[in-house]
Amino acid sequence: MNKGLWYAVGAYVLWGVLPLYWKALQTVPAIQIVGHRMVWSLIFVGALFVLKPHWSRFYRVAKNKKVLLIYFAAGSILFFNWFTYVWAVNAGYVVETALGYFTNPLVYVLLGVLLLRERLRLWQWVAVASAAGGVLYLTFFYGSLPWIALVLAFSFGFYGMVKKVAPLPALDGLFLETALLFLPAIFLLFYQEATGSGAFGHSNLTVTILLIFTGVATGLPLLWFAAAARRIPLTTIGVLQYIAPTMQFLLGVYLYHEPFTADRLTGFSLIWLALLIYTIEGAVERRRSAVQHVN
């Protein structure tokens, strides 16, 4: 197995077990966890960033107002996504967070049509229709709109769309995103401290240490993913991306015993079918394009 594959598997496995991490911080309010996550991510990524010899290029690009606006938007969307995810895990909705990340690739396709005026191929439309059918089934027959899944899928989808126009490499971009939101995050944490609800240093030692390491838990899989993306084909990444939500789904059902009824299985199955169609169609289309390019 080449190094890129190990990086990708490592990143997705870490993302897959993150519910265990957030559950260990269940006594801390979600907004506070995300504030720590933003602050400690900046410290972790910044420690790696200072080792890079490209400060002048980073400063030249980052001082542009349009670039700052792009990364502030990206960071704000990421903050919202993180808050929703951490809150949902600790409120007992791990299965629904998994559904959100299962749905995410199809949301990218839908946003491409709506915002970039991309044209879908027939089987891509079938995949999107199957996923939409799954969401509608869960809404009308299971009796509850899977809003957590939709918020996670669309917020991460919009984050990806913003990052498409972002000019900096992965490490530089993450450093700038967290730096721009550092002051709001640190203000939030000081406000929590001033009101007597701060957990850092006031809970047991384990909680304090886990809050510090939220930066590593956030930054490490992102950096591994970036390293993998440079070394292995996108088709491989496309298949491996389902490791994380599958692990989250299994944790939710078998470890945390969240309800998974027959109606819910039907809705999920329509979305899983959509992912199967999407993955196979993409692989066939890329192979066809490669053959045409050679000929």
Image: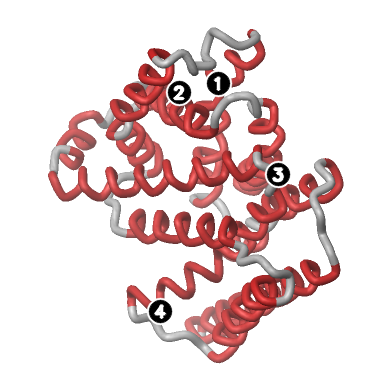
Camera-side residue: 232 or 190?
190
Q: Say which residue label 3 marks.
A: 92
Q: Amino acid at mark 1?
A: Leu
The percent position of residue 217, horizontal first and vertical second, equals 57, 30
Q: Nearer the viewer, mark 1 or mark 4?
A: 1
Determine whether label 1 and label 2 are within 8 Å by CB. Answer: yes
Query: Which residue is at 80% across, 71% downward?
Result: 263
Residue at x-position 81% and y-position 42%: 256
Q: On residue 113, which mark appears?
A: 4
Q: In this image, 168 relative to 222: left or right?
A: left
**How many neighbours does mark 3 have within 10 angstroms: few (below 14), some (14-19), or many (20 or more)?**
some
Q: How many marks?
A: 4
Of labels 2 and 3, the one closer to you: 3
Distance from the alpha carbon under mark 1 to that under mark 3: 20 Å
Q: Position of residue 140 (x, y in %)?
A: 67, 76
Q: Are marks 1 and 4 in contact (CB under 8 Å)?
A: no
Relative placement, left or right, of 214 versus 58 is right
Residue 237 is at least partly visible in this image: no
Q: In this image, 250 relative to 80: left or right?
A: right
Q: Is residue 74 visible?
A: yes
Q: CA distance from mark 2 to mark 4?
A: 36 Å
Residue matched to label 2 = 40
